[in-house]
Every structure is written in structure tokens, then in C-alpha cells.
Image (cartoon, helix red, strand yellow):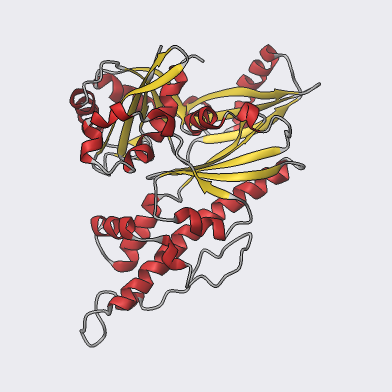
């Protein structure tokens, strides 16, 4: 049983380990740590020495015995595609994909790792999900984990552990048993890369990796205010999206303009007469920057929903569920600009028993940060737990 999950989707590395007792699952251990941003970007390892040392420290500091892991990656370069083939025999499907993979994945065959699974079979055809990623990304991960003394059970795109954890939390098989046209949209706000995906008939549908993430919010603030990444991060953590409500005069629309007129940006460092910028100017710049970043996320959600409904006429979106990294009242701002029901959910709430609060992780961090940071690694750990 491989019950440890390791998320390598950003510079915030997280680990979760489960134990199963009877029919119940318990989070036996969890941990996360941040490494230098130059060392890993969107699951692409740039400085292997830094990551190897970080993994060794993570295991040693948290006294984790299991060294076999399920690894999750997030990267906009990962190809995720639904296709339909005029075949139903699984051997014939496998042969067809093997020889036609170049038609579906725009990555040179000699630099491609791919997999697929069958979503559903019809009378004369089958719907498949194909996943493709460059070998270089996978080979680097394998090399680094091997150097850190770890063994890999599986490497998978993080859309799958996100779905797995959501399924455990919501039980998709029975959620809309009486109405198979109902679907849910899951939005995971990530540190570097975010995920938008759909569920229907207890299957993962149309997942996407997008750049609208915490890093986007932070980078926009840093650029507009000409401040360091650390200062931008502090502003981001303190900002309340509710403050945008009084300035947002737009009605609910399908697509929100990404370009919002900014005033006073050139005066952020100093006025023409050398006087320091007024705080009200800085506040307005911060609000405009946050609004632009949030609207980009809203645009991505809207486009994904429109594409999903165009490809699946007759389906409907019952609910949008927001999870992952947390910005104060982001869900309220997003909900006000979409025509669908939206709520924030904590997918790890079933796995944080009181006993785990003795873990040093809870002593060193605000408790609300922990479930946001270990969410994907929990979904990865569930891969090895048999139902």
C-alpha cells in the first residue's frame, strides 16, 4: 500500500501520508516547506541540488518512514485532451493510440511520455482522456527523487489527485444519481499553477492547467507598485477582496475585461515634485491590480465552462467549488461576477483530527494555511489507499 503523496507543483513542496484502519482513513502525517523560487517552477526542476536537500530535510524533520511516494505535477505544458475513437475493444484502442498519438499530442514522440484511460464506451465508439508530458520533466523528477533516497510508485498530473480528493469528500457517484446531466466545476487556486476541471457521472472531465495563480496576483502587485516579491506577498495576504465591491460597478457578464484602466501607477515611487505618493493612490493601485488578477481567473473559469457546455450540450453546471490557496473573500468577488453558484470548500476537513494538532506543523503556522497547502498531496496519497 503506497499511502504517501508528494506534490511538486511549485516551490511549496507538500507531503501527506495516510493510514487505513478498518473502513476509516487517518492522516498520519503531513508537512510542507518552501524552497527558493529559482529551484523549481511549475514542476520543472531547475536546481536539483536544492530540491534533493529539501526532500531529505522534509523526511528527516518530520520523521517520515515511508519512502515510496505518488508524485503530483502541475504544468501548463501538460497536454490533457478528450477524444472519441470509433473503437470499443480495449486492445484495438491501445494499438490505435500507440500509432496515432502524434495526432493528439503536439510533442515529439521521442520526447513524449503519455497515458490514457477510457471515460465511457458507447455502442460503436469510446471516449478517452489522453495525458501527455515531455520526458525531460519526468526524467528530472525521477533523478532528483532517486538522489533523495525516495522511490516512485506513480507520477501523475495534479488534476487527478484533485478529483480523487473531491470524490472522497463529495461522493460523485451518488451526488447526482437521479440527474446525470448535472455537473460540477472544481477550481483549485494554486501557488504557481491553478486547475479547472469538471465532474460528470463520477468521471473527471475537461481538466485544464492555467497560469492564473497566487504568483500572478503577487507578480502583478510587485510590478505595479515596484516593490519586492516579499512586500507584494505581505500586501496580498492582508488584502480583503470585499474592498473591491464598492468600486466594482460592472454587472455580471460572461467575460470580464482583463484590461482595467489604472491611474496613478507612474506616481507610486514619487510625485513629480518629489513628494511621497499619497496612501490613497497606493490603495487604488493595489485594488486595481487585485481586480485585474481576479478578473483573469474569472475569465479562465468562464471560458472553461463555455467550452465544457459546448462540447456537452444538455449538461448543466450545478455548482462551482473553489479550493486551494486562500485569498480573503476571493470566493465572494468571483461569485458576484459569475452566473453560477459558487462556494469555497475544504477538501481536507475529514483528515485533520485533533491528534494531528500535536504535529509541529500546526504550531509553526496558522491552522488555516495547512489544509490549503497539503490538499494535492492528500489526493496523491489516496491513490494508494484501496477502497
Left/right of residue 231 with respect to residue 299 in the rendered view: left
Can residue 348 be seen in the rendering of this structure?
no
Where's the N terminus, which quadrant?
top left
Q: x, y percentage for residue 273?
A: 23, 88
Q: x, y percentage for residue 175?
A: 63, 32
**Image position of 83 with respect to 124: above or below:** below
Using the image as rendered, state which of residue 328 and residue 134 is in the foreground: 328
Q: Which residue is drawn at 54% across and 29% down?
A: 167
Quadrant hosting residue 315: top right
Q: Residue at x 57, y 46 (%)?
A: 320
Using the image as rendered, state which of residue 62 and residue 128 is in the foreground: 62
Q: Outermost residue toward the bottom?
A: 273
Q: x, y percentage for residue 169?
A: 51, 31
Can residue 353 be seen in the rendering of this structure?
yes
Using the image as rendered, state which of residue 306 and residue 24 is in the foreground: 24
Q: Outermost residue toward the front?
A: 354
Q: Outermost residue toward the right?
A: 123
Q: x, y percentage for residue 151?
A: 33, 16
Q: Which residue is drawn at 73% across and 34% down?
A: 179
Amino acid at each position: 500500500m503506497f499511502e504517501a503523496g508528494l506534490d511538486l507543483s511549485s516551490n511549496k513542496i507538500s507531503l501527506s501520508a495516510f493510514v487505513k484502519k478498518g473502513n476509516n482513513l487517518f492522516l498520519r502525517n503531513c508537512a510542507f516547506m518552501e524552497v527558493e523560487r529559482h529551484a523549481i517552477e511549475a514542476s520543472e526542476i531547475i536546481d536539483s541540488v536544492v530540491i534533493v536537500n529539501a526532500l531529505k530535510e522534509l523526511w528527516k524533520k518530520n520523521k517520515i518512514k515511508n519512502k515510496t511516494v505518488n508524485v503530483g505535477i502541475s504544468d501548463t505544458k501538460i497536454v490533457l485532451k478528450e477524444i472519441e475513437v470509433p473503437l470499443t475493444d480495449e486492445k484495438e484502442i491501445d494499438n490505435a493510440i500507440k500509432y496515432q498519438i502524434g495526432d493528439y499530442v503536439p510533442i515529439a514522440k521521442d520526447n513524449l511520455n503519455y497515458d490514457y484511460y477510457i471515460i465511457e464506451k458507447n455502442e460503436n465508439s469510446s471516449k478517452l482522456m489522453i495525458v501527455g508530458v515531455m520526458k525531460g520533466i519526468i526524467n528530472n523528477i525521477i533523478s532528483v527523487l532517486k538522489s533523495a533516497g525516495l522511490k516512485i510508485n506513480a507520477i501523475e498530473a495534479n488534476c487527478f489527485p484533485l478529483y480523487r480528493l473531491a470524490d472522497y469528500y463529495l461522493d460523485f457517484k451518488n451526488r447526482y444519481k437521479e440527474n446525470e446531466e448535472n455537473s460540477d466545476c472544481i477550481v483549485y487556486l494554486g501557488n504557481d499553477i491553478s486547475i479547472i476541471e469538471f465532474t460528470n457521472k463520477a468521471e473527471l472531465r475537461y481538466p485544464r492547467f492555467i497560469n492564473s495563480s497566487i504568483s500572478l496576483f503577487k507578480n502583478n502587485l510587485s510590478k505595479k507598485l515596484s516593490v519586492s516579491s516579499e512586500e507584494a506577498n505581505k500586501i496580498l495576504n492582508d488584502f480583503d477582496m470585499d474592498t473591491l465591491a464598492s468600486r466594482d460597478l460592472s454587472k455580471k457578464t460572461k467575460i470580464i475585461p482583463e484590461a482595467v484602466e489604472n491611474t496613478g501607477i507612474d506616481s507610486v515611487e514619487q510625485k513629480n515634485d518629489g513628494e511621497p505618493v499619497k496612501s490613497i493612490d497606493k490603495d487604488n493601485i493595489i485594488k486595481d491590480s487585485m481586480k485585474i488578477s481576479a478578473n483573469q481567473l474569472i475569465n479562465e473559469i468562464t471560458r472553461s465552462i463555455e467550452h465544457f457546455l459546448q462540447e456537452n450540450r444538455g449538461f448543466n453546471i450545478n455548482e462551482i467549488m473553489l479550493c486551494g490557496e486562500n485569498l480573503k473573500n476571493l470566493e465572494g468577488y468571483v461569485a458576484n461576477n459569475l452566473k453560477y453558484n459558487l462556494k469555497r470548500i475544504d477538501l481536507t476537513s475529514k483528515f485533520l483530527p485533533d491528534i494531528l494538532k500535536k504535529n509541529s506543523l500546526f504550531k509553526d503556522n496558522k491552522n488555516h494555511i495547512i489544509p490549503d497547502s497539503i490538499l494535492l498531496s492528500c489526493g496523491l496519497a489516496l491513490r494508494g489507499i484501496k477502497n
